Image (tube, rainbow, N blue to C red):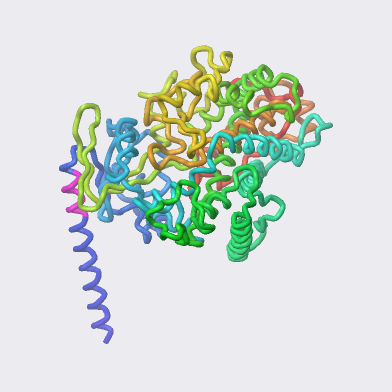
C-alpha cells in the first residue's frame, strides 16, 4: 500500500515538474520575442504557496553561489518594489523589463511614454480584477470591475465628486484637524509629550472626514479599534443597511441633504426610486423604470470602497508628510512662511475654500503634498494585464516592442517617481530624499497662482473639465509648480481608471497641513536616547547628536519598516514626534 502512495506522490511531483518546465519555456519564448529586456527566475514571486513559505526558503536559496542567484534572488521577495526602487531599471539599462517565471511573465514599467499608452488603452490593458477580491467582502464596486460593468459603476459613483462638494471636504477637514491637534497637545503649552501614534491619529482624522463629509455618519460609526474583525464586518454591514434604507426613504419622499451624500448618490443612481440622476444606463432599466441598476451588494461594495480608499490614502500622506517635515526642519520653516503669507492672522474659521485652497495648492503646501506622494505614493505598483491570447504592442522611444499575451503589468510608481530622466535633481541620491523645494519653479510659492479659478479657463479647454459632471479632471499639480511629463507622476493612477477621489484627498491633505503648521512645528522626539531634563542641560553639539540619532532611526524605518497591505504603511515600528509651538523649536537643523 505504501509503495502505491509513494508512486502516486512521485508521479504527481514529476507531472508538476514537467508542467512547470513547459510553462517556463513558453513564457521565456514570449519574452525573447518581445524586444523587452528580461530576467529569468525559477519561481513566480506571487505564487500563493511561495508567498506563504518564502521566509522558510529564502535562507536556503541565499546559501547558493552568488553566480547562480545574483540576477534574480532579490525579486523573490514580495516587497522588492519598495526595497529596490529605481535600481533594477538603472542596472538593466531600460525603463521597462520583464520578469520571466514559470507562473507568469510580469512587465515592470517606469517609463512615462509606456504608462500613458497602457492607461489610455483600457481594453488592451485591463485591470486584473481577481487581485481585488479582498475589497469585495460586501459586493462588487467601481474598483473591482472591468469593461461594461465598470463603466456602469463609474457613471453611478462619479457624480458626487464635484468641485462644489469639495467645499464641504475643506470645512470638515479644517474642523477635524483642529480636533486632532487639540487631542494631542493643549493650546496653552509650548510642546506636547512624545506622540507615538501619529499614524493612528491621521487614520482617525481621515475616517472622520470621509464619514462626515461623504456619508454624514460621524458619531454613529460602529468601527471600534478593539473590536474583533468579524464583529466589525457584521456591524459595518448592518450600519450600511440602516443608512441605505434611510436614503431610500428620503429619496422616495423627495427629501435630500446638502453636501456630498455618497450613499444617497448610489441609491439614486441605482434607480431604486424610479429616478436616475442622468448617469444610470437607461438601456438596463425597464420601461417602467423599476429595474435596479446596482444590486444591494454592489451599493454596499462601493460604499465600503469609498470608506476604505477615502481615508487610507489621505491618512498615509498626512502621517508621512508630518514625519518627513520633522526630519527636514528647513523645509518646514519654508512651508510655515508660505502659510503666513497666504493665511495671515486669520483664524481657521475664516479660511475660505475659494480664496485659500488655490493658493495653498500652488505654494510650498502643495509642494510638500506632491513631494510626499512622489516618495511614498499610496500603492507602490499599479496592476494591469495584457489581454488573454493577444500580445500588445507599445512604442518606446520610437522603437516597437511587444508585451506578451496574458502578461501581468505593474506600473512601478516608486521607481517611476525616482526616474532621473524626469525629475529635477542634484544627484540620484537627491531623488531618494524628501525635498519639496524641487517643485518650486518660476517663483513657485511667491506667485500663489490661482489653480482653481485663474487657471479655470485653461483647464476647461485643455482638460475637458466639467465641475458639474463627475470628478475634477485638472492635473495633479498646480500650474505654478513643477509639472512632470505626462505619465511620470501617477500617485492617483492615470487615464480612465484614475482615482475618483483625487481632489477630495488633496483638499483634505492641504487643510490638515495648513491647520497644523500654521500654529505648530513638529520635531522628531529624541526621548529614546535623552530625557527632557538632559536635553535642557545639553549643549548644541549634544542636542544635534541626539537629533541625528532620531533622524537615522526614522530613515531606517522608512527603508526597512514599510509593508504593503492594500496601501504601503510603516508597519514594523513607529517614529515618535512632538508638537511644538512655533518659536519654541529645539531642533532646527538642515539635513
What is the residue that sits farthest to the bottom in this orientation?
1
**Percent coordinates x, y for residue 100 in the rendering:** 25, 48
Question: Who is closer to the viewer here, 556 or 372?
Answer: 372
The answer to which of 399 and 62 lies nearer the viewer is: 399
Residue 229 horizontal side relative to residue 77, left or right: right
Placement of the C terminus among the 4 image quadrants: top right
**Residue 553 seen in this snapshot:** no
Query: In the image shown, does 422 or 500 lie closer to the viewer?
Result: 500
User: Which of the 4 image quarters holds residue 233?
Assistant: bottom right
Per the picture, the main secondary structure of the magenta-coloured stretch is helix
Q: Residue furthest right?
A: 188
Magenta stretch bounds:
24-31
Q: Quadrant of the N terminus?
A: bottom left
Task: Name the spot of residue 119 as percent of width and height, x first.
Answer: 34, 39
Between 172 and 158, the one nearer to me in the picture? 158
Q: Is residue 55 above or below residue 496?
A: below
Pinpoint residue 228: horizontal percent, then vertical percent: 62, 63
Q: Is residue 25 magenta?
A: yes
Q: Could you tell me if residue 308 is visible in this image? A: yes
Magenta span contains residue 152: no
Give the quadrant of residue 17. Answer: bottom left
- Relative height, residue 127 to residue 525 (above, below): below
Instruction: Give left or right: position of 375 versus 395.
Output: right
Question: In the picture provided, is 469 more to the left or to the right than 587?
Answer: left
Quadrant of res 586: top right
Tell me what residue is drawn at x 44 percent, y 50 percent: 280
For the image, the number of numbered tags is: 0
Amino acid at each position: 500500500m505504501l509503495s502505491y502512495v509513494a508512486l502516486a506522490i512521485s508521479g504527481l511531483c514529476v507531472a508538476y515538474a514537467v508542467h512547470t518546465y513547459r510553462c517556463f519555456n513558453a513564457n521565456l519564448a514570449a519574452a525573447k520575442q518581445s524586444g523587452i529586456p528580461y530576467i529569468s527566475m525559477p519561481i513566480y514571486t506571487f505564487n500563493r504557496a511561495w508567498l506563504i513559505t518564502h521566509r522558510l526558503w529564502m535562507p536556503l536559496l541565499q546559501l547558493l553561489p552568488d553566480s547562480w542567484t545574483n540576477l534574480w534572488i532579490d525579486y523573490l521577495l514580495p516587497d522588492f518594489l519598495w526595497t529596490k526602487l529605481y535600481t533594477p531599471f538603472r542596472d538593466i539599462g531600460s525603463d521597462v523589463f520583464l520578469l520571466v517565471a514559470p507562473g507568469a511573465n510580469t512587465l515592470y514599467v517606469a517609463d512615462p511614454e509606456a504608462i500613458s499608452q497602457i492607461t489610455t488603452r483600457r481594453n488592451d490593458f485591463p485591470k486584473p480584477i481577481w487581485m481585488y477580491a479582498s475589497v469585495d467582502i460586501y459586493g462588487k464596486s467601481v474598483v473591482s470591475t472591468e469593461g461594461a460593468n465598470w463603466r456602469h459603476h463609474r457613471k453611478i459613483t462619479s457624480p458626487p465628486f464635484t468641485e462644489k462638494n469639495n467645499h464641504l471636504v475643506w470645512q470638515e477637514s479644517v474642523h477635524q484637524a483642529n480636533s486632532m491637534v487639540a487631542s494631542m497637545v493643549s493650546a496653552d503649552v509650548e510642546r506636547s509629550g512624545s506622540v507615538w501614534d501619529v499614524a493612528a491619529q491621521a487614520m482617525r482624522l481621515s475616517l472622520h472626514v470621509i464619514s462626515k463629509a461623504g456619508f454624514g455618519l460621524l458619531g454613529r460609526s460602529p468601527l471600534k479599534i478593539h473590536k474583533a474583525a468579524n464583529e466589525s464586518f457584521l456591524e459595518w454591514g448592518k450600519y450600511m443597511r440602516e443608512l441605505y434604507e434611510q436614503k431610500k426613504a428620503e429619496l422616495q419622499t423627495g427629501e435630500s441633504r446638502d453636501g456630498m451624500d455618497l450613499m444617497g448618490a448610489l441609491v439614486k443612481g441605482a434607480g431604486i426610486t424610479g429616478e436616475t440622476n442622468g448617469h444610470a444606463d437607461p438601456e438596463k432599466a425597464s420601461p417602467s423604470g423599476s429595474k435596479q441598476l446596482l444590486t444591494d451588494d454592489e451599493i454596499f461594495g462601493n460604499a465600503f470602497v469609498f470608506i476604505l480608499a477615502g481615508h487610507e490614502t489621505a491618512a498615509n500622506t498626512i502621517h508621512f508628510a508630518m514625519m518627513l517635515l520633522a526630519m527636514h526642519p528647513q523645509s518646514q520653516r519654508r512651508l510655515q512662511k508660505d502659510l503666513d503669507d497666504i493665511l495671515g492672522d486669520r483664524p481657521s474659521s475664516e479660511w475660505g475654500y475659494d480664496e485659500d485652497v488655490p493658493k495653498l495648492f500652488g505654494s510650498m503646501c502643495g509642494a510638500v503634498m506632491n513631494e510626499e506622494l512622489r516618495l511614498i505614493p499610496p500603492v507602490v505598483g499599479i496592476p494591469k494585464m495584457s489581454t488573454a491570447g493577444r500580445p500588445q504592442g507599445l512604442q518606446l522611444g520610437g522603437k516597437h516592442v511587444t508585451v506578451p499575451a496574458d502578461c501581468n503589468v505593474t506600473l512601478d510608481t516608486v521607481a517611476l517617481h525616482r526616474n532621473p530622466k524626469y525629475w529635477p535633481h542634484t544627484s540620484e541620491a537627491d531623488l531618494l530624499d524628501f525635498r519639496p523645494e524641487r517643485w518650486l519653479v518660476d517663483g513657485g510659492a511667491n506667485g500663489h497662482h490661482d489653480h482653481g479659478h485663474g487657471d479655470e479657463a485653461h483647464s476647461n479647454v485643455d482638460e475637458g473639465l466639467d465641475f458639474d459632471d463627475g470628478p475634477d479632471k485638472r492635473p495633479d499639480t498646480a500650474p505654478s509648480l513643477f509639472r512632470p511629463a505626462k505619465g511620470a507622476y501617477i500617485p492617483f493612477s492615470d487615464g480612465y481608471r484614475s482615482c475618483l477621489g483625487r481632489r477630495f484627498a488633496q483638499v483634505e491633505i492641504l487643510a490638515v497641513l495648513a491647520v497644523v503648521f500654521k500654529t505648530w512645528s513638529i520635531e522628531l522626539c529624541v526621548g529614546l536616547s535623552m530625557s527632557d531634563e538632559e536635553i535642557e542641560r545639553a549643549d548644541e553639539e549634544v542636542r544635534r547628536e541626539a537629533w541625528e540619532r532620531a533622524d537615522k532611526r526614522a530613515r531606517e524605518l522608512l527603508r526597512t519598516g514599510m509593508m504593503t497591505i492594500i496601501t504601503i504603511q510603516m508597519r514594523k515600528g513607529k517614529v515618535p514626534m512632538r508638537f511644538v509651538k512655533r518659536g519654541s523649536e529645539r531642533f532646527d537643523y538642515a539635513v
